[in-house]
Amino acid sequence: MTEVLFYHLERARLEDVLPGLLEKTLARGWRAVVRTGSKERAEALDAHLWTYKDEGFLPHAATGEGARQPVWLTHGEDMPNAPQLLFLVDGATADPAAIASLERCVMIFDGRDDAAVGEARGFWKDVKAVGCEATYWKQSAQGGWEQQA
């Protein structure tokens, strides 16, 4: 059954944490899809992942031949690269039954946004109802992640 992780942002922005999580994903030899809430957000993250650090970049794409990409950025439900991991960001959603073939699904949400918190709570209930293992991670004062539930 798919493991679902909920990352509650309190101090950092998505742009600060997503690259590190994607680096860890690729280090495992996994492929990922990052599903955003809008086409504009997917485009902004696409640009960010090319420039977020001077000494490298994350191989990814938001257009073109997705099957060859280790990281695919989208605002739709497409997963052309046969990922092991789906990231849900900026209000993106997934049907709990549709993620059953994945190793992991990660929902990253902004704790300062009441609507985002409500969406995360709803998704938590939905994935638990279909038998997924769910864990909740919150940013510590030092910026690391601490498991809460």
Image (cartoon, rainbow, N blue to C red):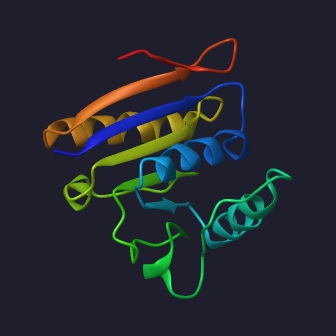
Q: Is residue 50 above or below residue 100?
A: below
Quadrant, the C terminus? top left
Q: Is residue 31 above or below residue 116?
A: below
Residue toward you, 70 or 94: 70
Residue for point 65% across, 39% down: 17
Q: Position of residue 115 (x, y in %)?
A: 54, 40
- Outermost residue on the top side: it is 141
- Is residue 132 rendered to the left or right of residue 117? left
Residue toward you, 26 or 16: 26
Q: Position of residue 143 (x, y in %)?
A: 68, 20
Residue for point 40% across, 25% down: 136
Residue toward you, 15 or 52: 52
Quadrant, the N terminus? top left
- Is residue 4 rendered to the left or right of residue 117? left
- Outermost residue on the bottom side: it is 64
Q: Position of residue 7 (x, y in %)?
A: 50, 33
Residue for point 35% across, 57% down: 94
- Is residue 122 rendered to the left or right of residue 63? left
- Looking at the rendered structure, the number of numbered marks drawn on it comes to 0
Rendered image quadrant of residue 31: bottom left
Rendered image quadrant of residue 82: bottom left
Q: Is residue 140 above or below residue 109?
A: above
- Outermost residue on the right side: it is 54
